[in-house]
Amino acid sequence: MLWLYAFCAIIANYVCAFRKVRPMEDYFYSCVQGLDGVFDIYYLSADPYAYGRLDSFKVNRNVKFDFVSLDETYKTDNLMRVGCVCTVIQFNSYQYIVMPMMIDGLMSDALTLCIYRDSSKSVMDVMNLPTDSLEHYMIAQYVVQMPRSLVDYTLEGKHDCINKNGQPSSIIPGQKMCYYYNYVLYKKTNLYVDTIEKRSDNGPFLGSQLPDFKRLANITLQDPLAFANYQWFAMCAVVKTAERIDSDLWKPDCVYTEYKDNEHPLYTLEIATCCCNAATDPACEQPMKGARDNLTYCSIGNQDRKNGEFGNFCATTIHQVYVIHEGNWELLIANEGKTKEAKYFPAKQYLPSVEIQCAGYYAIVSQASYCSGTSFCNSHLGSNLLIKRCHYSFALDFKTNGCAVVFYNETGKLHVVSPAWFDMEKSEVYHLFTSTHNGFSYDVSAAFLVFHKISESCKSKEPRTDRQYYVLHCKFSNCDENYTESFFNSKEFYDAFQIVDHVKYPRCENGSIKLVTTDGDLHKLNVQPKTTHIIALYCTFLLTFDFRKQKYYIDMSFWPVYPRPPDCNEQLTQLGENTIYYCCYAARADKPYINPECHYSTALQKLVILLKAKSIKGPGNQNRTSIGIYENADDCEQRRIGQFGNYRQCTPGGAGCFHLLQMDLTKKDVVASCIGHAENLIASKGEYYDNFGEAMICRTPESRDSCQYVYEGGKLYLLCCCQSEDVYDHVAQCTEDSKMMFHESDHPLK
């Protein structure tokens, strides 16, 4: 009976912990209704080995058990007593059940023989065996009745429980109850919340398969006995069959609990347990579906109040708050005290996202993160995202990368940018050099940064994309606070940074060329681009062409790009009717750093060939429309009219162009197009008249090639009109463009 004393301290307080709702006590007294006889109990455990019996006890409707007594031996007896009394047994007969028991600190399972008899009969009469042979008989029964494995594939579709892999569980004698548990134990340091232990199981209720409730309770500073009972340990142990369950007394259920000490949260335990009556019980539905469909158990709620639920993915959304440093939006500083709550939920799809919003003197990084495969992983992820590790960022990747400071060179001065604007994990860096400051080392790298999604509230406040950025990494928490703009512009750092100009790294041409010429031999022009070469991974080249008023207008742009665009192609490609040449290639480490196929001279040669094929000729060789019937287009700027974008050829042509602006708006709100297109839109839908009906005034002779103020509907408008007259290759142009007239400085525009 030594095992009883080891177990008694646990079970005594298990029962006491239920005094408020008394489910096990009430359950016992509901079971004795209609009973009038004697119970005998024998038990046998194989690992470790233990055999014994409890004293016989009489049961009738007047029986009284002292469930709150602290007599240790008596209280230990009650677990098996309640289990046997609440098992359906015919009078003068017996049944086998399996009960959990602890022996020398180890939780085991005992094959328990429950005998219900008349007081006039003996155990030997009911069993038809001499009592001194019962131990050998119990050993034989243990071999026959206890399964060798907890998985039995022959029971597919007939089983009461499945395990955590979705496999059918073996039949346990007298056992109908299924038990699911899942827990994760975390330990919090100053910089991270780490998972130090996790375990889960699903199947018939067996003591040998349970976690060590006492140890988990001690780690999280909980009362171990109340803790175990709250996980349905006692009730799931004694409830054996559905016939004995009275929903008014106790209903099988699932419970999620988070245990932590809010004042000293060194350890946090998240645990979910379900006790349910076989596969037909609704309480079994979630864990069984989770096992069959390989779902992950997720936290739901927020950091103050949580529950649990299965999902394909687990998700968390958090809001990290950054302070604006002295009005400089580029220089955000992480503010842990202002961090808003995290939210946790299951999800069917994997949709991670990050967006930066600006409000007042704060920038808020809203982050949705997803995970799967590990229970409560979204709670773990959210807890880590809320810890501030660095001065300029929360730096979830601190373990591998430390703190980061982004900076750039502009007109010979270095400026600091917060890494919060960028997705540092998706960005790429090339190490340049290592140095020290105040005895601590740091690394400087060329950075190819991926920007986070920027909301409209942050437009014009975010850092520019067309810069060469660098990043400094240091290795201890908040070390980035030491690297300010005064440090970057000191002689100490300036001398070390000079190596950047001499390292052999891939580079791209950066800048633009604008040409306006009447010379049709474009490829023979003496082009002297004023561009720079900056460290990069991918380079792009773009050429746009227009021919109007007997002149060639050519814009060429060169810039680095990261990450690699999906349409990156090292072959010079023509895009669209308005003659755009585009090229993208991997940056080169050798001068002149340009892929010959993407050089501007190559593009100009191809442009000349294209122009000849289209019969676009320069001054003195105009290709005027003279033979055939064509629909001419007008060469007009397209703004806020719905379908043309930056394309200037507008139909139907012949009437000219207009620019229309309501005078209480800004220049960017101007409506511009060809008059013929505006007429067609108004004819198709009358409501367009309210938007740009004033453009019809351009049809009057006195309005041609001039600007005037129009008062309509209580509002004042500026209207500029031009008449298209010169036609080249079916495109008509105004002698003086309405765009040029609109932008003249004497108009009082905002």
Image: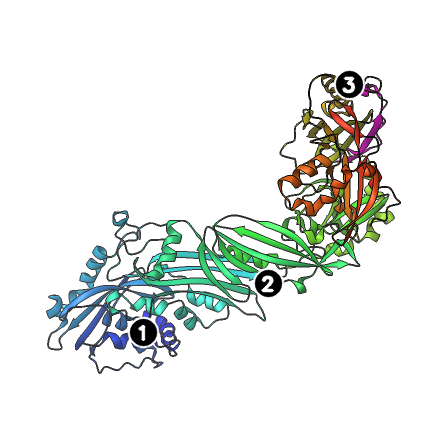
Q: Residue at x 83, y 24 (%)?
A: 550
The answer to whether residue 192 shows anywhere in this view is no
| Front position among marks 1 and 3 | 3
Q: Which residues are magenta?
A: 509-535
Q: Quadrant of residue 380?
A: bottom right
Residue at numbered disc 1: 249
Give the spatial CA distance, label 2 vs label 1: 38 Å
Q: Earlier in the sequence, mark 2 or mark 3?
A: 2
Q: Secondary structure at mark 2?
A: loop
The magenta stretch spans residue 363: no
Residue at numbered disc 3: 623
Q: Against 667, is 544 above or below?
A: above
Q: Please name the amino acid that badge 2 sits on.
A: Glu
Give the image location of residue 53, x and y in percent: 23, 71
The magenta stretch spans residue 521: yes
| Front position among marks 2 and 3 | 3
Q: Secondary structure at mark 3?
A: loop
Q: Please name the amino acid that badge 1 sits on.
A: Leu
Residue at numbered disc 2: 341
Which quadrant of the rendered structure holds the N terminus?
bottom left
Furthest residue in direction right, as rendered: 746
Q: Please name the amino acid that badge 3 sits on.
A: Asn
Comparing 210 with 49, the one in front is 210
Give the spatial CA distance, label 2 vs label 3: 69 Å
Neighbours of disc 3 within 10 Å: few (<14), some (14-19), many (20+): some
Question: Along the horizontal axis of the image, is 742 left or right of 562?
Answer: right
Comparing 513 with 33, the one in front is 513
